[in-house]
Image (cartoon, rainbow, N blue to C red):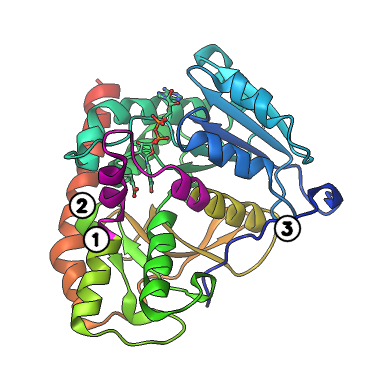
Amino acid sequence: MMLSRAIKFAPAARSLSTSVQNNMKVAVLGGAGGIGQPLSMLMKLSHPPAFVDEVAVYDIQHAKGVAADLSHIDTAAKVTGHDGEGELADALKGSNIVIIPAGVPRKPGMTRDDLFNTNASIVASLAEACAINCPEACIAVISNPVNSTVAIAAEALKKHGVYDPRRLFGVTTLDVVRARTFIAGKKGFDPKDVSVPVIGGHAGGTILPLLSRTEPATSFTDEERDALTHRIQNGGTEVVEAKAGAGSATLSMAWAGAQFAFALVRALNGEKNVVECTMVESDVTSCQYFSSQVELGVNGVERNLGLGDLSDYEKQKLEAEVIPELQKSIEKGQKWFHEQYQK
Ligand SMILES: NC(=O)C1=CN([C@@H]2O[C@H](COP(=O)(O)OP(=O)(O)OC[C@H]3O[C@@H](n4cnc5c(N)ncnc54)[C@H](O)[C@@H]3O)[C@@H](O)[C@H]2O)C=CC1
Ligand SMILES: O=C([O-])CC(=O)C(=O)O
């Protein structure tokens, strides 16, 4: 099955037909940030079959300004802005999808795990707000370290008795976007024609591109395979270093987050065979949360497509590098939540 493709933007947004759409509300938490602003804009530019009726932009500050700006774009989606905790409930109520890019980004020399101390409590409190205000929403966590924040969000939802493993996702789409781009560059393909699963987690050695399953079918020398794997695993660091202290990937992440959100919208609207790589609760490996190809449906996760065939190289990396590190990060998140929130 092919991975679902990026939505192409229709030049004539005014010709939107909303008649076949469900009323779809997407909330972006951290919506005034580096990722949040372009991601909210991509939601505002949406069109069938992934049309978003309402975009709620929430941040601790400046969300109203972002919303005012976006609301002048001549597309049909309604945009609302919500500043500060007192306005979070309004942002969340009625949301079908909540995307969370709230939290601090890396600077050069830091790992994603170095963000844990700040971002863990941000994600926990936002997930709790979702549990109270939109318990049935699909929640897509972008905030790093994703390898821990997904587990933290799950614990927060469990605390309120509303955790549904079909509706919580860690967004790992940027790893797939990078894999397509870098493979296309190497092999002379158009990136839009490339399909490749990327599994595991979202940090360094836990990111495992399955190059052996690249479509169109192609072959890599061992040197090419090693170099591509390394570049995909370190794509985030490449951007952090290039930005030299001004943050991490925002525009490519907004694009990737929008692709994932649009896939969810299409699946929630009843489209079949929508497949994305995303981190979900999983029994595919010994890791409780693991990113693999997942078929999305009207309730979120419809079916986990599992690992599929792996080359010996990929099997070795999965066992020796991905699982041990990802497992530790998941446990760190769970332990932190229980120490902080369930004393
Ligand atoms: N999953 C992935 O593939 C990727 C994840 N990221 C992560 O996304 C996060 C955000 O990155 P950027 O947008 O570049 O950072 P940023 O600093 O530009 O924006 C973050 C926004 O979150 C807001 N915020 C902080 N606390 C909040 C709270 N309690 N409630 C609501 N909003 C809050 C800030 O006010 C700010 O507007 C980082 O943790 C980064 O590491 C970044 C790129 C890729
Ligand atoms: O590298 C970072 O800190 C941001 C991120 O997750 C990415 O770009 O993949």
Front position in the image: 120 or 51: 51
Which portion, as a residue range, is magenta? 233-256
90 to 127, vertically: above or below: above
Task: Give the spatial CA distance, label 2 vs label 1.
Answer: 8 Å
The residue pinned by badge 1 equals: 286
> Where residue 57 sits: x, y (%)?
59, 28
Tag 3, which secondary structure? loop
Which tag is nearer the camera, tag 2 or tag 1? Answer: 2
Checking the image for residue 49, the label placed there is 3
Choose the circle earlier in sequence order: 2 or 1.
1
**In whole angstroms, how far apart are the C-alphas of marks 2 and 3?**
37 Å
Residue type at numbered disc 3: Pro
Q: Residue 238, position in %: x, y?
A: 27, 51
Callouts 2 and 1 close, C-beta under 8 Å: yes
Residue 81 shown left or right of residue 222 in the figure = right
> Which comes sooner in the sequence, label 3 or label 1?
3
